Image (tube, rainbow, N blue to C red):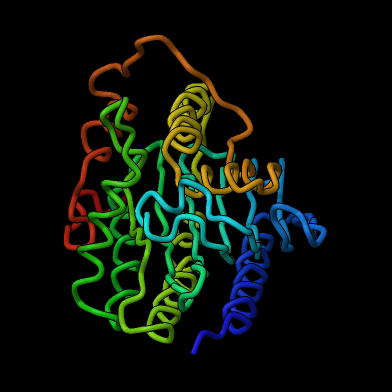
Amino acid sequence: MIDTLAVRNYLLDLQQRIAAALQAADGNPFITDAWEREPGGRLEGDGIVRLIENGALFERGGCNFSHVRGRVLPPSATQHRPELAGAAFEAMGVSLVIHPHNPFVPTVHMNVRMFAAMPPDAEPVVWFGGGMDLTPYYGFERDAQHFHRTCRTALQPHGEDLYPRYKTWCDEYFFLKHRDEPRGIGGIFFDDHDEGGFDASFALMRAVGDAFLPAYLPIVERRQVLAYGERERDFQAYRRGRYVEFNLVFDRGTLFGLQSGGRTESILMSMPPQVKWRYDWAPEEGTQEARLYTDFLRPRDWADEQATHLWL
């Protein structure tokens, strides 16, 4: 049985819990912007944006809930499911991106979602997707290990094989092909999941959503006290450019939202507020900035590694 109301209620509660915890960490309120599409248009539905800008800790951050219905699946959704071309659809999810002020606190992304396609004269096809990934500007082994171990723990009750599969999927998905480099240190990512039926897939999605705060907040608390200057902020702005490039060129969620006529303000909420690009730049060898490339922007088995610098 497909219980879309249960999914909606869970996602609204998840958004509220995450926004409340991040608001408490920052000390400043998130604004709330509820929206609704008029019936009869290309896209119907509603959503809630929870957003902070220029907070004490978070330079820009948002946690969005959306629930939309459309008459025809956009091309980005049928790329991997060509048999569903022309089908009506329903989609709902929570998506967040947090860009902190402090360059030693990593950017983070999380998304959990349900998708249902309704082909003519056929039963609905339902699947779930989601994941979370970490994008540090200055790498700390302890943080990477904690993030990946929390992801692994969340997935273990649903199958011992899921974390290795979804970690690899994340490494491959969040990869800038034109730069030949990862966006960050990965995490987990999955899509088109319907293994075990609706109940099992919904439970997996909940496990991922519920793991976000335990995965990210300890890192925030550990790094927000570190002092930084213009050098670190300048490198942060440069690396944020990679984030923009990925989201606008490769991200399926961004493409789906724009192609389906979604709400532009909500879709582009993930963009960082300050970004820089440089021509043919590379960090000086032996610096902390260079270490991000040599030690962190490559696939590693973080969950099984032991820290070599325990004080970090």
Residue in front for this viewpoint, 34 or 239: 34
Q: Position of 271 compared to 109: left or right?
A: right
Q: Residue at x 29, y 83 (%)?
A: 157
To which quarter of the image does residue 65 belong? bottom right
Q: Is 280 located above or below residue 114 in the figure?
A: above
Q: Is 210 located above or below residue 178 in the figure?
A: below
Q: Residue furthest front?
A: 121
Q: Residue furthest top?
A: 279
User: What is the x, y in percent for residue 169?
Assistant: 27, 54
Residue in front for this viewpoint, 227 or 181: 181
Q: Residue at x 49, y 45 (%)?
A: 107
- Total marks shown come to 0
To which quarter of the image does residue 197 belong? bottom left
Residue in front for this viewpoint, 20 or 285: 20
- Viewer can see residue 30: yes
User: What is the x, y in percent for residue 259?
Assistant: 57, 43
- Viewer can see residue 57: no
Q: Residue furthest bottom?
A: 1
User: What is the x, y in percent for residue 310?
Assistant: 26, 54
Q: Residue at x 35, y 42 (%)?
A: 184
User: What is the x, y in percent for residue 41?
Assistant: 76, 54
Q: Residue furthest right?
A: 38
To which quarter of the image does residue 10 belong? bottom right
Q: Position of 83 compared to 260: left or right?
A: left
Q: Residue at x 37, y 61 (%)?
A: 191
Q: Position of 89 compared to 175: left or right?
A: right
